[in-house]
Image (cartoon, helix red, strand yellow):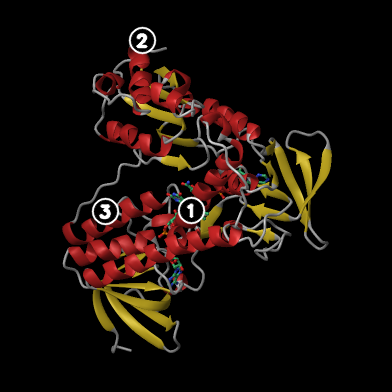
Amino acid sequence: ASEAKDYDVIFIGGGVAGYVGAIKAGQEGLKVACIEKRGSLGGTCLNVGCIPSKSLLNNSHLYHQILHDTKRRGIDVGDVKLNLKQMMKAKDESVNGLTKGVEFLFKKNGVDYIKGHGAFVNEHEVAVSLIDGGQTQVKGKNIVVCTGSETTPFPGLEIDEKKVITSTGAIALEEVPKKMLVIGGGIIGLEMASVWSRLGSDVTVVEFLGQIGGPGMDVEIAKNTQKILTRQGLKFKLNTKVTKGDASGQGVKLDLEAAKGGKNETVEADVCLVAIGRRPYTDGLGLENVGIEQDERKRLVIDQEYRTKIPHIRVIGDCTFGPMLAHKAEEEAVAAVEYIKHGHGHVNYNAIPSVMYTNPEVAWVGQNEKELKEAGVKYNVGSFPFTANSRAKTNLETDGMVKFLSDAETDRILGVHIIGANAGEMIAEGTLAIEYGASSEDVARTCHAHPTLAEAFKEAAMSTYSKAIHY
Ligand code: FAD
Ligand code: NAD
């Protein structure tokens, strides 16, 4: 057993957390291996998550826009047809290009890529069942667990990825379903509902809570978003619980119950997407051989420096605490390697942006109004609508607004919430402002180019402590 090859650090899982950590470790001169069982690097994000979903969101938007939003722009188009096969091919090409790119970066930074399933043998050794057959064993001074997450199943509805699908099926459907039901109006539900609705499906989203977008989204922004998505053709049933699913017939039937008592109904569709959240994935990892703790939600328990009870075994990304976001995993990966190499690292969990890539996009960073109220923080609100922004007017994309929340006493920015075209790019400025502890006046006194959507950002900041010029 002591034949095992020695490493300074081993990453179990080659998703965003694992691959970024491995590259960083290579750059730091550490001897590093990354074990991945999928046969391709980049994890959920590159293979079946962020990247393929954004390809479909972009191209389905273009299709929808060409169908419905060209006349007023002075463009008369002829026969517009969907070629779903080609749209899927374009998606696959983006994915393949990026995953191959990571493999190249591994070579460039001296990372050993071990293709197989890793399981702890003991606190320093990991056995790998190789994809190509056979076994190998590796030994690490440090081991970083980054095995990611999986879809939370809906009891009683068996996933076949054709009729009852997760996001993985939703990025690979072979035809546009006539009717589609989505359980869960969070980020996955809304992004995927947008894609298929734009391509022609009649989509209904069933959400247990009274608002869409999940708990992080500001209530005012969520209401605004729901209005716009409804206008685009999406249907919503809020405050509604799915109590039972039945996929034994031709389509899928769901029994619904109003969350606070009320009428029950049964709805039917050809395809049902289960999007009620994701949970940590640690199957077959041999956690029992090292005694790493999990909490009631299966998250691996760690301290501030990502250490488990066994200090040289760390955990980062979706399989531990915090938002399940690729950029959060990436930040943790860099910090974890810095802890290993230098003894210190840094992630500001208050400055992690969220973006929902619907049209318009929704993005936020920091706290929302509900959170500030609950914490008893006194705050000022500033906002600016895109209807009053010159670039939005020229682009005929005036839906949405920018909203600033700043400390009532110090004017320090506490949260920024945006719904509008390019919100996902614009939120970077809000994130930087929060990272640097800026006040809304700092942002408002910074010159922004004209005409840009970012001027709405500046003016929202201005209206937080003073008055906007253009509204
Ligand atoms: P993962 O990416 O899940 O990677 C874990 C890897 O570990 C997997 O490849 C798995 O095969 C491997 N593995 C597991 N166990 C073992 C083992 N024992 N041995 C070897 N390998 C193992 N986030 C965003 O920030 N922006 C987005 O736009 C976005 N869009 C998304 C869209 C969808 C449809 C989904 C599902 C997710 C999306 N996410 C998005 C979330 C993002 O994908 C995750 O937060 C991110 O992938 C987490 O990275 P990770 O490395 O922790 O885990
Ligand atoms: P989510 O937690 O965002 O949303 C799940 C929603 O389902 C919630 O609103 C919840 O109230 C609802 N729900 C739960 N049980 C229900 C039931 N029985 N009936 C009706 N509604 C129910 O989870 P998700 O959308 O599955 O996404 C999972 C993770 O993936 C998230 O953490 C998200 O951050 C990440 N993700 C991010 C992006 C992005 O950054 N653009 C895109 C996709 C996924």
The CA distance from mark 2 to mark 1 is: 39 Å
Mark on residue 335? 3
- For disc 2, the neighbor class at 10 Å (few under 14, some 14 to 19, many from 20) is some
Q: Position of residue 36 (x, y in %)?
A: 40, 72
Mark nearer the viewer, 2 or 1? 1
Q: Nearer the viewer, residue 434 or 398?
A: 398
Dot 2 or dot 1: first in sequence order is: 1
Q: Position of residue 226 (x, y in %)?
A: 61, 32
The CA distance from mark 1 to mark 3 is: 30 Å
Question: Which amino acid is tagged 1?
Answer: Ser
- For disc 3, the neighbor class at 10 Å (few under 14, some 14 to 19, many from 20) is many
Q: Please indicate, yes or no, whether residue 454 appears anywhere in the rendered image.
A: yes
- For disc 1, the neighbor class at 10 Å (few under 14, some 14 to 19, many from 20) is many
What kind of element bears circle 2? loop
Respond yes or no on whether mark 2 lies under 8 Å from ligand 2. Answer: no
Please identify the quadrant where the C terminus is shown: top left
Respond yes or no on whether mark 3 lies under 8 Å from ligand 1. Answer: no
